[in-house]
Image: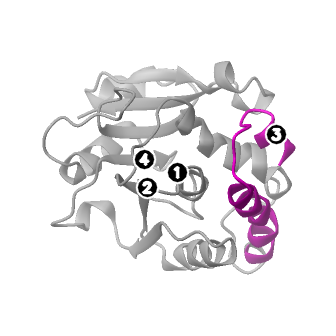
Amino acid sequence: MDNILKYFTDFTAQQQHQLMALAPLYKEWNEKINVVSRKDIDSIYVHHVLHSLSIATITNFDSGMEIIDIGCGGGFPGIPLAIFFPDVHFHLVDSIAKKLTVVQAVCEGAQIHNVTTQHTRAEQIKNRKFDFAISRAVAPLKDLWQWSKPLLKKGNTVTADNLANGLICLKGGDLHQEISESLTRPSLYSIYDIFPEPYFQEKYIVHVKK
């Protein structure tokens, strides 16, 4: 938790309470349904929560926006971002139902009320649109962009700080081939430049505008 407060200093008391609740909740549920690597569970605040919150350093989602987290797994990056942006709605989607059981339990335990879940694949969602799609290391960028495009609202909306709507995903390693195959021209942000922790070397925020 100290690693979070080192980089973010303006959390409300409620947000701090919600963040502090995450570690015990995930440790409890991870014993029943493995959604976080066993070797990572003790580093949950850096490897998962802070990693997720890196997205909040490149934009402020506007109040009332709707965000879809594609392949949310145990709730990253969606749950930490839902705490950070309490006036934004996050829709967490995964094809594995038991992972959503953990998401729902963590949200209930931490009193996070701006999250909904759906047991489905992103490409099967119809008649619903979002301002942004977010994801963390779920699939190649080519696939993520293909799944995201039909889910993004029409028109070129931007956040108050002028980030164009589209896909924001967390990726690691050498991304040259993956980007080339995706036929996109994303903006890349080095997370290590934002949070100079050893874990974030060669980890990036990738933004593809619609």
Residue 88, numbered circle? 2
**Label located before the other in sequence (3 or 1):** 3
> Residue at position x 23%, y 53% from top?
151
* Residue 135 located left or right of residue 46: left
Taken as a whole, is the magenta stretch helix, strand or loop? helix
Task: Name the residue that disc number 3 marks.
Answer: 3
Q: CA distance from mark 4 to mark 2?
A: 13 Å
Q: CA distance from mark 1 to mark 2?
A: 6 Å
Viewer-nearest of discs 3 and 1: 1
Task: Name the residue that disc number 1 marks.
Answer: 85
> Residue at position x 35%, y 55% from top?
64
Tag 4 and tag 3, C-beta contact below 8 Å: no
Viewer-nearest of discs 4 and 1: 1
Q: CA distance from mark 4 to mark 3?
A: 23 Å
Amino acid type, label 1: Phe
Amino acid type, label 4: Ile
Q: CA distance from mark 4 to mark 1?
A: 14 Å
Tag 1 and tag 2, C-beta contact below 8 Å: yes
Amino acid type, label 3: Asn
Point out the image quarter for the C terminus: top left
Q: Tag 2: Cα neighbours inside 10 Å, few (<14), some, or many (≥20)? A: some
Q: Tag 1: Cα neighbours inside 10 Å, few (<14), some, or many (≥20)? A: many
User: Which segment did they paint magenta?
Assistant: 1-29
Query: Mark 4: which secondary structure?
Result: strand
Q: Nearer the viewer, residue 64 or 206?
A: 64
Residue 134, numbered circle? 4
Viewer-nearest of discs 2 and 3: 2
Query: Mark 2: which secondary structure?
Result: loop
Viewer-nearest of discs 4 and 2: 2
Tag 4 and tag 1, C-beta contact below 8 Å: no
Q: Nearer the viewer, residue 180 or 59?
A: 59
Q: Residue 54 appears at what percent x and percent y?
A: 60, 36
